[in-house]
Image (spheres, rainbow, N blue to C red):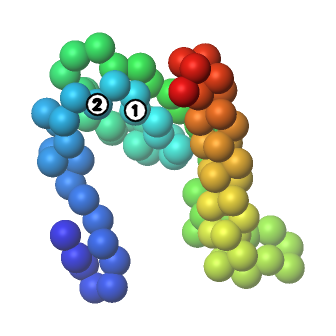
């Protein structure tokens, strides 16, 4: 789906996709994320809301980038642990 210059996917498109792990990164998503069928492992990593996260001397874009990088580091650590645990 395209809205303006942004691309997004509706979560409904994934409900029957055999999702095994759901990771939410904002409190709104944690509370409103749909229930996936089957055995699903859920993780919630709470990050600041970028539009409200700018620190003194930091632009809103810099806040988005900082939080994006925090999410990347957290996911990479999770993925490395998952690979180690599964031998993959």
In depth, the one of 22 and 30 nearer the eye is 22
**Mark sitting on residue 51:** none
Q: Secondary structure at mark 1?
A: strand
Q: Are marks 1 and 2 in contact (CB under 8 Å)?
A: yes
Looking at the image, the residue that sits furthest to the top is 39
| SS of the residue under disc 2 | loop
Residue at image coords 19%, 36%: 17
Give me the residue at 67% from left, 70% from top: 65
Q: Quadrant of residue 64 in the image? A: bottom right
Q: Is residue 32 visible?
A: yes
In the drawing, does residue 82 fall left or right of residue 22?
A: right
Residue 79 drawn above or below residue 82 = below
Q: Residue furthest toward the bottom?
A: 4
Give the residue at the far front of this rendering: 87
Q: Which mark is residue 22?
A: 1
Where is residue 22? Give x, y as percent: 40, 32
Residue at (41% x, 43% y) in the render: 29
Residue sitting at 33 percent across and 85 percent down? Answer: 5
Crowd class of label 2 (few under 14; some 14 to 19; many from 20; radius 10 Å)? some
Left or right relative to 3: residue 43: right
Question: Compared to 26, does 78 lie above or below?
Answer: above
Q: Quadrant of residue 56?
A: bottom right
Up-down: is 82 above or below 23?
above
Q: Quadrant of the C terminus?
A: top right
Position of residue 53 in the picture relative to residue 35 (left or right): right
Foreground of the two, 1 or 84: 84
Q: Give the label on residue 19, or none.
A: 2
Pinpoint residue 28: horizontal percent, then vertical percent. 43, 44
Distance from Cα at disc 1 to Cα at disc 2: 7 Å
Q: Is residue 17 above or below residue 88?
A: below
């Amino acid at each position: 789906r395209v809205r303006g210059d942004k691309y997004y996917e509706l979560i409904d498109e994934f409900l029957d996709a055999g999702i095994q792990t759901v990771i939410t990164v904002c409190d709104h998503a944690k509370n409103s994320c749909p229930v996936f069928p089957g055995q699903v492992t859920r993780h919630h990593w709470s990050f600041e809301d970028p539009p409200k996260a700018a620190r003194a001397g930091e632009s809103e874009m810099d806040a988005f980038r900082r939080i994006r990088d925090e999410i990347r580091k957290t996911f990479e650590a999770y993925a490395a642990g998952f690979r180690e645990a599964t031998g993959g």
